[in-house]
Amino acid sequence: MKQTQFLSLLLCGALISGLAAGCQKTPEKPIVREKGALSTENYKEADPAPESKSNALSQRLQVPEKYEASRTGNDGSYQLNCNADVYVPDVDKIAIYKVGQKPFDQEWINTVTNAFFGDAPIYDGDAYFQTTKAEAQERLNQLKAWQAEGNLDPFGLIASARENGMENPEEAFSLAQSIASWEEVYNSAPETIEKTVITPAFGAQQQYADRGDGYFSGAVELDDAVYSYRLRETLSAPMDIRICRIENGDSSMIANWTPSMYDSGDAPANPSAPSREKAEEMAGITPEQAVEIADGYMETLGLGNFSAKTADLSLKTQQSEDSLIPTTEISFPDAGYMVSYTRDVDGFPVTDEMDMGGGLESMESTVEPWCYERIEFYVNKDGLQRADIFNLYELEEEQVSNVEILSFPEIADIFEEMASIHFSDYTAPDSIKVNVSKATLGYMRIYDPGADSRHGLLVPVWDFFGVQDVHYVYDGEANDHTIGYPRMSILTINAADGTVIDRGLGY
Protein backbone atom coordinates (compact mmCIF):
# COMPACT_ATOMS: atom_id res chain seq x y z
CA MET A 1 0.00 0.00 0.00
CA LYS A 2 2.75 2.44 0.94
CA GLN A 3 4.62 1.78 -2.28
CA THR A 4 1.42 2.31 -4.26
CA GLN A 5 0.87 5.63 -2.50
CA PHE A 6 4.42 6.66 -3.30
CA LEU A 7 3.99 5.78 -6.97
CA SER A 8 0.84 7.89 -7.09
CA LEU A 9 2.83 10.81 -5.71
CA LEU A 10 5.57 10.06 -8.21
CA LEU A 11 3.20 10.20 -11.14
CA CYS A 12 1.73 13.44 -9.81
CA GLY A 13 5.28 14.73 -9.62
CA ALA A 14 5.72 13.83 -13.27
CA LEU A 15 2.77 16.00 -14.19
CA ILE A 16 3.97 18.86 -12.03
CA SER A 17 7.46 18.69 -13.46
CA GLY A 18 5.96 18.73 -16.95
CA LEU A 19 4.23 21.98 -16.12
CA ALA A 20 7.38 23.31 -14.55
CA ALA A 21 9.24 22.71 -17.78
CA GLY A 22 7.40 25.69 -19.21
CA CYS A 23 9.13 27.88 -16.61
CA GLN A 24 12.62 26.86 -17.65
CA LYS A 25 14.92 29.13 -19.59
CA THR A 26 13.34 29.52 -23.04
CA PRO A 27 15.36 27.66 -25.70
CA GLU A 28 16.42 29.45 -28.84
CA LYS A 29 13.63 27.78 -30.82
CA PRO A 30 9.99 28.46 -29.82
CA ILE A 31 9.37 24.84 -28.84
CA VAL A 32 6.53 25.56 -26.41
CA ARG A 33 3.60 27.19 -28.15
CA GLU A 34 1.34 29.57 -26.28
CA LYS A 35 -2.33 28.69 -26.02
CA GLY A 36 -4.41 30.29 -28.76
CA ALA A 37 -1.78 29.78 -31.46
CA LEU A 38 -3.87 27.40 -33.54
CA SER A 39 -3.94 29.63 -36.61
CA THR A 40 -2.94 28.06 -39.92
CA GLU A 41 -0.45 30.93 -40.25
CA ASN A 42 1.94 28.61 -38.39
CA TYR A 43 1.88 26.18 -41.31
CA LYS A 44 3.70 27.08 -44.51
CA GLU A 45 3.36 25.58 -47.96
CA ALA A 46 6.40 23.52 -48.90
CA ASP A 47 7.99 23.55 -52.31
CA PRO A 48 6.15 21.41 -54.87
CA ALA A 49 6.58 17.72 -54.11
CA PRO A 50 9.14 16.00 -56.34
CA GLU A 51 8.11 13.28 -58.75
CA SER A 52 6.57 10.42 -56.78
CA LYS A 53 8.97 7.71 -55.69
CA SER A 54 9.18 5.21 -52.87
CA ASN A 55 10.07 6.66 -49.46
CA ALA A 56 10.20 10.17 -50.90
CA LEU A 57 9.15 11.79 -47.62
CA SER A 58 11.69 9.81 -45.58
CA GLN A 59 14.48 10.89 -47.88
CA ARG A 60 13.39 14.51 -47.87
CA LEU A 61 13.28 14.55 -44.06
CA GLN A 62 16.65 12.75 -43.70
CA VAL A 63 15.05 10.00 -41.62
CA PRO A 64 17.46 7.29 -40.45
CA GLU A 65 16.47 3.62 -40.32
CA LYS A 66 17.39 3.69 -36.64
CA TYR A 67 17.38 6.67 -34.31
CA GLU A 68 20.27 6.34 -31.87
CA ALA A 69 21.13 8.91 -29.23
CA SER A 70 21.98 9.20 -25.55
CA ARG A 71 22.17 11.91 -22.93
CA THR A 72 23.02 11.96 -19.24
CA GLY A 73 22.21 14.65 -16.70
CA ASN A 74 24.97 16.48 -14.86
CA ASP A 75 24.51 14.43 -11.68
CA GLY A 76 23.85 11.17 -13.50
CA SER A 77 20.30 10.78 -12.16
CA TYR A 78 18.78 11.26 -15.62
CA GLN A 79 19.60 9.15 -18.65
CA LEU A 80 18.11 9.16 -22.14
CA ASN A 81 18.73 6.14 -24.34
CA CYS A 82 17.32 6.11 -27.86
CA ASN A 83 17.55 2.94 -29.93
CA ALA A 84 14.38 3.47 -31.89
CA ASP A 85 12.82 2.23 -35.07
CA VAL A 86 11.54 5.17 -37.12
CA TYR A 87 8.22 4.98 -38.98
CA VAL A 88 7.29 7.42 -41.76
CA PRO A 89 4.27 6.91 -44.05
CA ASP A 90 5.14 6.36 -47.70
CA VAL A 91 3.61 9.58 -49.06
CA ASP A 92 4.90 12.51 -51.10
CA LYS A 93 3.28 15.30 -49.12
CA ILE A 94 1.20 16.05 -46.05
CA ALA A 95 -1.82 18.36 -45.96
CA ILE A 96 -3.35 20.25 -43.04
CA TYR A 97 -7.09 19.71 -42.62
CA LYS A 98 -9.74 21.35 -40.52
CA VAL A 99 -11.92 18.87 -38.65
CA GLY A 100 -15.19 19.15 -36.75
CA GLN A 101 -17.38 16.76 -34.80
CA LYS A 102 -19.35 14.14 -36.67
CA PRO A 103 -23.04 14.68 -35.83
CA PHE A 104 -24.33 12.15 -33.31
CA ASP A 105 -27.74 12.14 -34.97
CA GLN A 106 -30.45 9.54 -35.45
CA GLU A 107 -29.08 8.52 -38.84
CA TRP A 108 -25.74 7.57 -37.29
CA ILE A 109 -27.44 5.83 -34.34
CA ASN A 110 -29.43 3.74 -36.83
CA THR A 111 -26.25 2.89 -38.75
CA VAL A 112 -24.47 1.72 -35.60
CA THR A 113 -27.47 -0.27 -34.40
CA ASN A 114 -27.80 -2.08 -37.74
CA ALA A 115 -24.04 -2.74 -38.01
CA PHE A 116 -23.84 -4.55 -34.69
CA PHE A 117 -27.32 -5.99 -34.19
CA GLY A 118 -29.10 -6.13 -37.54
CA ASP A 119 -32.82 -6.60 -37.01
CA ALA A 120 -32.50 -8.11 -33.51
CA PRO A 121 -34.93 -6.49 -31.04
CA ILE A 122 -33.45 -3.86 -28.71
CA TYR A 123 -34.78 -3.91 -25.15
CA ASP A 124 -34.86 -1.13 -22.57
CA GLY A 125 -31.58 -1.71 -20.76
CA ASP A 126 -32.65 -0.31 -17.39
CA ALA A 127 -35.55 -2.76 -17.18
CA TYR A 128 -33.64 -5.69 -18.69
CA PHE A 129 -30.59 -5.52 -16.43
CA GLN A 130 -32.48 -5.31 -13.15
CA THR A 131 -31.73 -7.95 -10.55
CA THR A 132 -34.69 -10.32 -10.18
CA LYS A 133 -36.15 -11.32 -6.83
CA ALA A 134 -34.73 -14.83 -7.19
CA GLU A 135 -31.21 -13.45 -7.78
CA ALA A 136 -31.48 -11.06 -4.84
CA GLN A 137 -32.82 -13.83 -2.59
CA GLU A 138 -29.91 -16.09 -3.53
CA ARG A 139 -27.44 -13.42 -2.49
CA LEU A 140 -29.33 -12.71 0.73
CA ASN A 141 -29.29 -16.39 1.64
CA GLN A 142 -25.50 -16.51 1.27
CA LEU A 143 -24.93 -13.31 3.28
CA LYS A 144 -27.24 -14.42 6.07
CA ALA A 145 -25.55 -17.84 6.19
CA TRP A 146 -22.21 -16.13 6.78
CA GLN A 147 -23.84 -13.99 9.46
CA ALA A 148 -25.22 -17.07 11.22
CA GLU A 149 -21.76 -18.66 11.17
CA GLY A 150 -20.28 -15.54 12.75
CA ASN A 151 -18.19 -14.85 9.65
CA LEU A 152 -18.47 -11.05 9.51
CA ASP A 153 -15.60 -10.59 7.04
CA PRO A 154 -16.31 -13.17 4.28
CA PHE A 155 -14.41 -11.21 1.64
CA GLY A 156 -11.38 -10.40 3.79
CA LEU A 157 -11.83 -6.65 3.38
CA ILE A 158 -11.54 -5.86 7.09
CA ALA A 159 -8.44 -8.02 7.42
CA SER A 160 -6.89 -6.33 4.40
CA ALA A 161 -7.65 -2.88 5.82
CA ARG A 162 -6.10 -3.86 9.15
CA GLU A 163 -3.01 -5.22 7.42
CA ASN A 164 -2.59 -1.96 5.53
CA GLY A 165 -2.77 0.14 8.69
CA MET A 166 -6.29 1.55 8.39
CA GLU A 167 -7.21 3.32 11.63
CA ASN A 168 -10.72 1.83 11.79
CA PRO A 169 -10.57 -1.33 9.65
CA GLU A 170 -14.15 -2.32 10.60
CA GLU A 171 -15.32 0.58 8.41
CA ALA A 172 -14.00 -1.24 5.32
CA PHE A 173 -16.98 -3.59 5.25
CA SER A 174 -20.23 -4.19 7.12
CA LEU A 175 -22.03 -7.47 6.60
CA ALA A 176 -25.17 -6.03 8.22
CA GLN A 177 -25.18 -3.08 5.80
CA SER A 178 -24.66 -5.42 2.85
CA ILE A 179 -27.66 -7.49 3.96
CA ALA A 180 -29.73 -4.33 4.34
CA SER A 181 -28.73 -3.17 0.85
CA TRP A 182 -29.71 -6.48 -0.71
CA GLU A 183 -33.01 -6.46 1.13
CA GLU A 184 -33.74 -3.09 -0.52
CA VAL A 185 -32.82 -4.60 -3.89
CA TYR A 186 -35.12 -7.57 -3.22
CA ASN A 187 -38.08 -5.37 -2.27
CA SER A 188 -37.92 -3.39 -5.53
CA ALA A 189 -36.83 -6.23 -7.81
CA PRO A 190 -39.16 -7.67 -10.49
CA GLU A 191 -40.05 -11.35 -10.51
CA THR A 192 -38.57 -11.82 -13.99
CA ILE A 193 -36.51 -9.85 -16.50
CA GLU A 194 -38.61 -7.19 -18.16
CA LYS A 195 -38.19 -7.22 -21.95
CA THR A 196 -39.55 -3.95 -23.27
CA VAL A 197 -38.72 -3.37 -26.94
CA ILE A 198 -37.44 0.14 -27.61
CA THR A 199 -35.94 2.06 -30.53
CA PRO A 200 -32.39 3.32 -29.76
CA ALA A 201 -32.57 7.11 -29.67
CA PHE A 202 -31.79 9.99 -27.37
CA GLY A 203 -34.95 10.88 -25.46
CA ALA A 204 -36.43 7.39 -25.87
CA GLN A 205 -36.24 6.70 -22.10
CA GLN A 206 -38.16 9.07 -19.87
CA GLN A 207 -35.83 8.59 -16.90
CA TYR A 208 -33.07 10.38 -18.84
CA ALA A 209 -35.25 13.20 -20.19
CA ASP A 210 -33.99 15.69 -17.61
CA ARG A 211 -30.30 15.04 -18.30
CA GLY A 212 -28.34 17.88 -19.79
CA ASP A 213 -26.89 15.50 -22.37
CA GLY A 214 -28.08 12.54 -24.41
CA TYR A 215 -28.22 9.04 -22.99
CA PHE A 216 -29.62 5.66 -24.00
CA SER A 217 -29.30 2.24 -22.38
CA GLY A 218 -30.27 -0.90 -24.27
CA ALA A 219 -29.94 -4.68 -24.12
CA VAL A 220 -29.71 -7.08 -27.04
CA GLU A 221 -29.95 -10.88 -27.12
CA LEU A 222 -27.75 -12.04 -29.98
CA ASP A 223 -25.91 -15.29 -30.80
CA ASP A 224 -26.61 -16.87 -27.40
CA ALA A 225 -25.22 -13.80 -25.67
CA VAL A 226 -26.56 -10.61 -24.14
CA TYR A 227 -25.03 -7.24 -25.03
CA SER A 228 -25.27 -3.94 -23.22
CA TYR A 229 -25.74 -1.09 -25.72
CA ARG A 230 -25.01 2.39 -24.39
CA LEU A 231 -25.14 5.71 -26.23
CA ARG A 232 -24.02 8.89 -24.50
CA GLU A 233 -23.06 12.44 -25.39
CA THR A 234 -21.36 14.79 -22.95
CA LEU A 235 -19.50 18.08 -23.19
CA SER A 236 -16.03 16.53 -23.48
CA ALA A 237 -17.18 13.36 -25.27
CA PRO A 238 -19.78 14.38 -27.87
CA MET A 239 -19.97 10.79 -29.13
CA ASP A 240 -19.61 7.89 -26.71
CA ILE A 241 -20.80 4.48 -27.96
CA ARG A 242 -20.05 1.34 -25.97
CA ILE A 243 -21.21 -2.20 -26.67
CA CYS A 244 -20.34 -4.90 -24.10
CA ARG A 245 -21.02 -8.61 -23.96
CA ILE A 246 -22.49 -9.39 -20.53
CA GLU A 247 -21.71 -12.79 -19.05
CA ASN A 248 -24.90 -14.75 -18.32
CA GLY A 249 -26.85 -11.52 -18.79
CA ASP A 250 -25.76 -10.45 -15.30
CA SER A 251 -24.81 -6.75 -15.47
CA SER A 252 -23.78 -6.77 -11.79
CA MET A 253 -20.56 -8.55 -12.74
CA ILE A 254 -17.87 -5.90 -12.77
CA ALA A 255 -15.70 -6.76 -15.78
CA ASN A 256 -13.35 -4.84 -18.01
CA TRP A 257 -10.72 -5.41 -20.66
CA THR A 258 -7.16 -4.31 -20.02
CA PRO A 259 -4.38 -3.12 -22.31
CA SER A 260 -1.78 -5.76 -23.03
CA MET A 261 0.06 -7.13 -20.02
CA TYR A 262 2.65 -8.85 -22.18
CA ASP A 263 4.61 -5.86 -23.47
CA SER A 264 8.04 -7.04 -22.43
CA GLY A 265 7.77 -10.80 -22.93
CA ASP A 266 5.72 -13.86 -22.15
CA ALA A 267 5.38 -13.11 -18.44
CA PRO A 268 2.44 -10.77 -17.66
CA ALA A 269 2.90 -7.61 -15.61
CA ASN A 270 0.42 -8.97 -13.04
CA PRO A 271 1.84 -12.18 -11.51
CA SER A 272 -1.66 -13.60 -10.98
CA ALA A 273 -2.53 -13.25 -14.67
CA PRO A 274 -2.19 -16.20 -17.07
CA SER A 275 0.95 -16.63 -19.15
CA ARG A 276 1.00 -15.39 -22.74
CA GLU A 277 0.66 -18.97 -23.99
CA LYS A 278 -2.38 -19.56 -21.77
CA ALA A 279 -3.94 -16.20 -22.74
CA GLU A 280 -3.51 -17.00 -26.45
CA GLU A 281 -5.20 -20.35 -25.83
CA MET A 282 -8.07 -18.60 -24.02
CA ALA A 283 -8.47 -16.10 -26.87
CA GLY A 284 -8.81 -18.98 -29.32
CA ILE A 285 -8.03 -16.94 -32.44
CA THR A 286 -5.01 -15.25 -34.02
CA PRO A 287 -4.44 -11.47 -34.19
CA GLU A 288 -5.12 -11.66 -37.93
CA GLN A 289 -8.48 -13.33 -37.34
CA ALA A 290 -9.32 -10.67 -34.74
CA VAL A 291 -8.62 -7.90 -37.26
CA GLU A 292 -10.74 -9.70 -39.85
CA ILE A 293 -13.71 -9.78 -37.45
CA ALA A 294 -13.28 -6.12 -36.54
CA ASP A 295 -12.84 -5.13 -40.20
CA GLY A 296 -16.26 -6.61 -40.91
CA TYR A 297 -17.90 -4.24 -38.44
CA MET A 298 -15.93 -1.26 -39.80
CA GLU A 299 -17.07 -2.04 -43.33
CA THR A 300 -20.72 -2.23 -42.26
CA LEU A 301 -20.32 1.04 -40.38
CA GLY A 302 -19.09 2.67 -43.58
CA LEU A 303 -15.74 3.59 -42.03
CA GLY A 304 -13.49 2.41 -44.84
CA ASN A 305 -11.17 5.38 -44.34
CA PHE A 306 -9.90 3.77 -41.11
CA SER A 307 -7.46 0.88 -40.77
CA ALA A 308 -6.36 -1.36 -37.90
CA LYS A 309 -3.14 -0.14 -36.32
CA THR A 310 -2.87 -2.43 -33.28
CA ALA A 311 -3.97 -5.98 -32.39
CA ASP A 312 -2.79 -6.60 -28.83
CA LEU A 313 -3.39 -9.67 -26.69
CA SER A 314 -5.61 -8.46 -23.86
CA LEU A 315 -7.21 -9.89 -20.74
CA LYS A 316 -10.67 -9.58 -19.35
CA THR A 317 -10.49 -8.61 -15.69
CA GLN A 318 -13.24 -9.14 -13.18
CA GLN A 319 -13.38 -7.80 -9.65
CA SER A 320 -16.50 -9.11 -7.98
CA GLU A 321 -19.78 -10.78 -8.77
CA ASP A 322 -21.40 -8.43 -6.25
CA SER A 323 -21.56 -4.77 -7.24
CA LEU A 324 -22.59 -3.85 -3.68
CA ILE A 325 -19.43 -5.30 -2.15
CA PRO A 326 -16.17 -3.46 -2.93
CA THR A 327 -13.11 -5.66 -3.33
CA THR A 328 -9.62 -5.50 -4.74
CA GLU A 329 -9.62 -9.17 -5.72
CA ILE A 330 -9.11 -9.50 -9.48
CA SER A 331 -9.56 -12.55 -11.67
CA PHE A 332 -8.89 -13.06 -15.38
CA PRO A 333 -11.79 -15.10 -16.79
CA ASP A 334 -11.13 -14.55 -20.49
CA ALA A 335 -8.70 -13.24 -23.11
CA GLY A 336 -8.89 -11.79 -26.58
CA TYR A 337 -7.37 -9.15 -28.84
CA MET A 338 -7.81 -5.40 -28.69
CA VAL A 339 -7.97 -4.08 -32.26
CA SER A 340 -7.46 -0.31 -32.47
CA TYR A 341 -8.36 1.80 -35.52
CA THR A 342 -7.35 5.28 -36.64
CA ARG A 343 -8.29 7.12 -39.81
CA ASP A 344 -6.04 7.51 -42.84
CA VAL A 345 -6.15 10.75 -44.83
CA ASP A 346 -4.53 10.71 -48.28
CA GLY A 347 -2.51 7.70 -47.14
CA PHE A 348 -1.28 9.50 -44.00
CA PRO A 349 -2.52 7.94 -40.71
CA VAL A 350 -3.60 9.43 -37.42
CA THR A 351 -1.11 8.07 -34.88
CA ASP A 352 -2.49 5.33 -32.65
CA GLU A 353 -1.93 6.74 -29.14
CA MET A 354 -3.85 5.82 -26.00
CA ASP A 355 -4.37 9.25 -24.37
CA MET A 356 -8.07 10.18 -24.52
CA GLY A 357 -7.32 13.93 -24.25
CA GLY A 358 -9.92 16.35 -22.94
CA GLY A 359 -7.68 17.54 -20.12
CA LEU A 360 -7.82 20.95 -18.44
CA GLU A 361 -4.93 23.22 -17.51
CA SER A 362 -6.36 23.66 -14.01
CA MET A 363 -9.41 22.85 -11.92
CA GLU A 364 -10.51 26.47 -12.35
CA SER A 365 -10.52 26.23 -16.14
CA THR A 366 -13.79 27.19 -17.85
CA VAL A 367 -12.94 25.89 -21.34
CA GLU A 368 -14.96 23.15 -23.01
CA PRO A 369 -12.70 20.10 -23.50
CA TRP A 370 -12.90 17.75 -26.50
CA CYS A 371 -11.61 14.17 -26.28
CA TYR A 372 -9.97 12.43 -29.24
CA GLU A 373 -11.50 10.18 -31.86
CA ARG A 374 -11.05 6.50 -30.99
CA ILE A 375 -12.36 3.13 -32.19
CA GLU A 376 -11.47 -0.11 -30.41
CA PHE A 377 -12.78 -3.66 -30.59
CA TYR A 378 -12.15 -6.56 -28.21
CA VAL A 379 -12.75 -9.91 -29.90
CA ASN A 380 -11.99 -13.58 -29.29
CA LYS A 381 -13.21 -17.04 -30.33
CA ASP A 382 -16.72 -16.15 -29.16
CA GLY A 383 -16.83 -13.05 -31.36
CA LEU A 384 -17.31 -9.46 -30.27
CA GLN A 385 -16.71 -8.83 -26.57
CA ARG A 386 -16.67 -5.06 -26.56
CA ALA A 387 -16.70 -2.14 -29.00
CA ASP A 388 -15.91 1.50 -28.21
CA ILE A 389 -16.58 4.30 -30.70
CA PHE A 390 -15.64 7.74 -29.41
CA ASN A 391 -15.87 11.27 -30.79
CA LEU A 392 -15.63 10.69 -34.53
CA TYR A 393 -14.40 13.63 -36.59
CA GLU A 394 -15.83 15.09 -39.75
CA LEU A 395 -13.14 16.02 -42.24
CA GLU A 396 -13.66 19.55 -43.51
CA GLU A 397 -11.71 21.81 -45.85
CA GLU A 398 -8.03 21.49 -46.61
CA GLN A 399 -6.03 24.35 -45.08
CA VAL A 400 -2.55 23.70 -46.47
CA SER A 401 -2.04 21.25 -49.32
CA ASN A 402 1.64 20.45 -48.78
CA VAL A 403 2.89 21.62 -45.42
CA GLU A 404 6.54 22.35 -44.85
CA ILE A 405 7.93 20.26 -42.01
CA LEU A 406 11.22 20.06 -40.16
CA SER A 407 13.87 17.49 -40.92
CA PHE A 408 14.24 14.56 -38.55
CA PRO A 409 17.64 15.75 -37.25
CA GLU A 410 15.98 19.03 -36.24
CA ILE A 411 13.12 17.17 -34.53
CA ALA A 412 15.58 14.86 -32.75
CA ASP A 413 17.48 17.85 -31.36
CA ILE A 414 14.23 19.32 -30.00
CA PHE A 415 13.17 15.99 -28.51
CA GLU A 416 16.47 15.44 -26.72
CA GLU A 417 16.47 18.99 -25.36
CA MET A 418 12.86 18.86 -24.13
CA ALA A 419 13.15 15.33 -22.73
CA SER A 420 16.14 16.48 -20.73
CA ILE A 421 14.20 19.45 -19.34
CA HIS A 422 11.09 17.42 -18.60
CA PHE A 423 12.58 14.35 -16.94
CA SER A 424 15.60 15.87 -15.23
CA ASP A 425 13.20 17.99 -13.16
CA TYR A 426 11.95 14.91 -11.32
CA THR A 427 12.65 15.27 -7.59
CA ALA A 428 10.93 12.15 -6.20
CA PRO A 429 12.99 9.33 -7.77
CA ASP A 430 16.67 8.83 -7.15
CA SER A 431 17.16 8.21 -10.85
CA ILE A 432 15.19 7.86 -14.07
CA LYS A 433 16.21 6.23 -17.33
CA VAL A 434 14.14 7.05 -20.41
CA ASN A 435 14.33 4.34 -23.06
CA VAL A 436 12.95 5.25 -26.49
CA SER A 437 12.14 2.31 -28.78
CA LYS A 438 9.98 3.89 -31.52
CA ALA A 439 9.51 7.23 -33.28
CA THR A 440 6.43 7.72 -35.47
CA LEU A 441 5.26 10.45 -37.83
CA GLY A 442 1.48 10.75 -38.09
CA TYR A 443 -1.52 13.03 -37.75
CA MET A 444 -2.88 14.38 -34.48
CA ARG A 445 -5.89 16.62 -33.91
CA ILE A 446 -5.04 19.82 -32.06
CA TYR A 447 -7.44 22.58 -31.05
CA ASP A 448 -7.82 25.77 -29.09
CA PRO A 449 -10.57 25.12 -26.50
CA GLY A 450 -10.55 28.78 -25.49
CA ALA A 451 -11.52 29.89 -29.00
CA ASP A 452 -13.45 26.98 -30.51
CA SER A 453 -13.80 23.66 -28.75
CA ARG A 454 -15.68 21.96 -31.58
CA HIS A 455 -13.18 22.40 -34.43
CA GLY A 456 -9.51 21.61 -34.74
CA LEU A 457 -6.71 20.85 -37.15
CA LEU A 458 -5.16 17.58 -38.25
CA VAL A 459 -1.43 18.30 -38.16
CA PRO A 460 1.62 16.06 -38.56
CA VAL A 461 3.42 15.24 -35.32
CA TRP A 462 6.33 13.13 -34.19
CA ASP A 463 5.66 10.79 -31.26
CA PHE A 464 8.41 9.09 -29.30
CA PHE A 465 7.42 5.86 -27.58
CA GLY A 466 9.16 3.89 -24.87
CA VAL A 467 9.30 3.46 -21.11
CA GLN A 468 10.77 5.16 -18.08
CA ASP A 469 12.67 3.04 -15.58
CA VAL A 470 12.49 4.74 -12.19
CA HIS A 471 14.70 3.83 -9.24
CA TYR A 472 13.81 5.22 -5.82
CA VAL A 473 14.28 4.56 -2.13
CA TYR A 474 11.23 4.54 0.14
CA ASP A 475 11.33 3.82 3.88
CA GLY A 476 14.91 2.72 3.45
CA GLU A 477 13.99 0.17 0.80
CA ALA A 478 15.22 0.39 -2.79
CA ASN A 479 12.54 0.00 -5.46
CA ASP A 480 12.40 -0.11 -9.24
CA HIS A 481 9.35 0.69 -11.31
CA THR A 482 8.67 0.94 -15.04
CA ILE A 483 6.20 3.48 -16.42
CA GLY A 484 4.84 3.30 -19.93
CA TYR A 485 2.85 1.34 -22.52
CA PRO A 486 3.51 0.67 -26.23
CA ARG A 487 0.77 3.15 -27.21
CA MET A 488 1.73 5.84 -24.68
CA SER A 489 3.83 8.62 -26.20
CA ILE A 490 6.69 9.97 -24.12
CA LEU A 491 6.72 13.28 -25.97
CA THR A 492 4.80 14.72 -28.94
CA ILE A 493 6.36 17.33 -31.22
CA ASN A 494 4.64 19.28 -33.99
CA ALA A 495 6.47 18.24 -37.15
CA ALA A 496 5.80 21.59 -38.87
CA ASP A 497 7.15 24.05 -36.32
CA GLY A 498 8.81 21.97 -33.58
CA THR A 499 6.47 23.04 -30.77
CA VAL A 500 5.76 20.53 -28.01
CA ILE A 501 2.15 19.35 -27.76
CA ASP A 502 0.54 18.12 -24.57
CA ARG A 503 -1.61 15.18 -25.65
CA GLY A 504 -3.59 15.34 -22.41
CA LEU A 505 -4.70 18.88 -23.26
CA GLY A 506 -4.87 18.57 -27.03
CA TYR A 507 -2.64 21.53 -27.88
Image: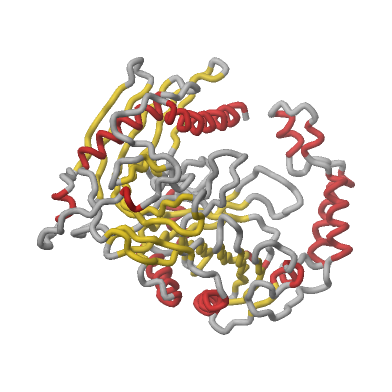
Answer above or below: position of 288 versus 451.
below
Residue in the image at 73% along x and 39% along y: 156
Q: Nearer the viewer, residue 343 or 499?
A: 499
Answer above or below: position of 43 versus 82.
below
- Asked if residue 162 can be seen in this view, the reply is yes
Q: Nearer the viewer, residue 88 or 298?
A: 88
Residue 28: which quarter of the image? Answer: top left
Answer above or below: position of 224 versus 336.
below
Direction bottom: furthest residue: 119
Q: Residue 14 location, x and y as percent?
A: 48, 31
Answer above or below: position of 252 versus 201.
above
Count every numbered label the image shows and give the total. 0
Residue 255: which quarter of the image? Answer: bottom right
Q: Nearer the viewer, residue 305 or 158?
A: 305
Q: Quadrant of the N terminus?
A: top right
Residue in the image at 50% along x and 77% along y: 115
Left or right of 179 on screen, residue 116: left
Q: Residue 181 location, x and y as percent?
A: 84, 53
Residue 435: which quarter of the image? Answer: top left
Left or right of 428 on screen, residue 179: right
Q: Residue 278 location, x and y as percent?
A: 45, 53
Left or right of 30 on screen, residue 247: right
Residue in the image at 50% along x and 19% along y: 473
- Asked if residue 223 can be seen in this view, the reply is no
Q: Residue 237 location, x and y as percent?
A: 56, 58
Left or right of 369 on screen, residue 205: right
